[in-house]
Image (cartoon, rainbow, N blue to C red):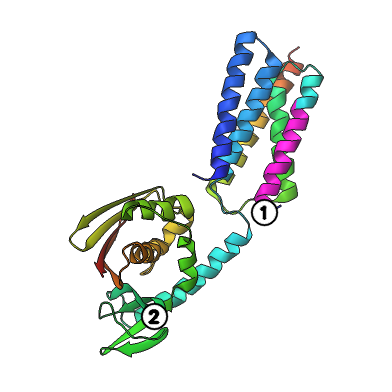
Amino acid sequence: MRSRLHQFIALYTTLSALSASALSLLSEQKPDAYIALNILAYYTSYAITRPGVESWRVKAVNIALLVVFLAIVSYRIYEVLTK
Amino acid sequence: MNKLLVLGINIVIASILLLAYGLVMAMPSVIGVSMSMAVIGGVIAVYSSLPRDPEAGFLLSYVKTLVNGLTAAIEDLDLLDAHSSIVRSGAGTLLIVSRAPCVENVDPGLGFSQGSPYIAIPLESLSTVFEGVSAEDVESFLRAVLVDELSICRAVSVSVEGNIYRVALSGLSDLLKEFTRYPLDPYTVVTLLALSRVAGARCVRLVDRSVTPEGVVLAVGVEV
């Protein structure tokens, strides 16, 4: 691997492909589940490879993905509680 | 546009097509996979604009330290409003900051010539970025070097008035933009060097430099 960024992209895409394949094989019908696992794959890859330099773009992506993840989880919890 | 950006955009386009297919066929799992792909494409596109390694962050700090030192030397020698020029001579290609334009027969380093102090910096290692780059005219050459090869700006336009080239660079790299507040910035040096090479000039000198919100506009005199 030439750099940490390439390691990050390789790990992230691999984990995302694995999670999407697993959910698809399990016949998961909720699109937000795919996104939630994708975001988990992103943070896992980020924590392992640490590709980021100080950049507002990376911070913006991290915050945006966290907000989306929290929204998905919150909605699911709300759904369970109101059933 | 670098390869990672192209990859990211392609993944996003593929995910949009897959999303359309999933919506038409009413397949939620395909919709989920396509949205997951879109996130991957977006992340790759964002990361494409970053320096490749955390080491680049250290390198940037190191370069800033050197530039601060060089700026202090320029100030101490009272060369803030002096001429910056690139001269090709027997000693190689030199970036010279001096009160007299196009000073010749100087050695690299600090010295006096024609009653004025000068700073001369050898640019041999920087010249390697032009290897393998060829173009029909000055604007194409600058675009090939600055946009395609180095990715330090997004657009280049050149107009010629006599022996003065007016070069406008826009869409500057976030990483290098802050160097434009120094007397010598990477855009000026690389542009002068590229013009020196493509024009086959003995000396090119910076006539005027203005930093705008869009980028940098350089007026460069070429002496063949």
Residue A24 picture quarter:
top right
Q: In this view, does A23 lie to the left or right of B5?
A: right
- The residue drawn where x is 26% and y is 90% is B115
Residue denoted by label 1: A3
Q: Does the magenta stretch include residue A11?
A: yes
Type of residue at label 1?
Answer: Ser
Q: Residue A58's spot in the image, x, y percent?
A: 58, 45
Residue highlighted by disc 2 = B120
In the picture, residue A61 is in which quadrant?
A: top right
Secondary structure state at the residue bearing disc 2: strand
The image shows residue A20 at horizontal and vertical percentages of: 74, 27
The chain ID associated with circle 2 is B
Q: Is residue B115 magenta?
A: no
Callout 1: 10 Å neighbours few (<14), some, many (20+)? few
Residue B151 visible in the shown view: no
Q: In this view, does B35 lie to the left or right of B158?
A: right
The outermost residue toward the left is B162
Residue B23's disc number: none
Picture coordinates of residue B133 (x, y %)?
A: 45, 56
Q: Position of A27 compared to B199: left or right?
A: right
Span highlighted in magenta in the image: A2-20
Instruction: Compare residues B140 and B183 and report the one nearer the observer.
Output: B140
Distance of label 2 from label 1 (alpha carbons)? 35 Å
* Contact? badges 2 and 1 (CB < 8 Å): no
Of the residues shown, which amino acid type is indicated by label 2? Ala
The reply to whether residue B204 is visible in this rendering is yes
Nearest to the observer: residue B16 or residue B65: B16
Q: In which quarter of the image is the C terminus of chain B?
A: bottom left
How many circles with numbers are drawn on the protein? 2
Residue B201, relative to residue A31: is it above or below? below
Q: Residues within 10 Å of mark 2 (few under 14, many from 20)?
A: many
Query: Which SS does the magenta portion mostly show?
Result: helix
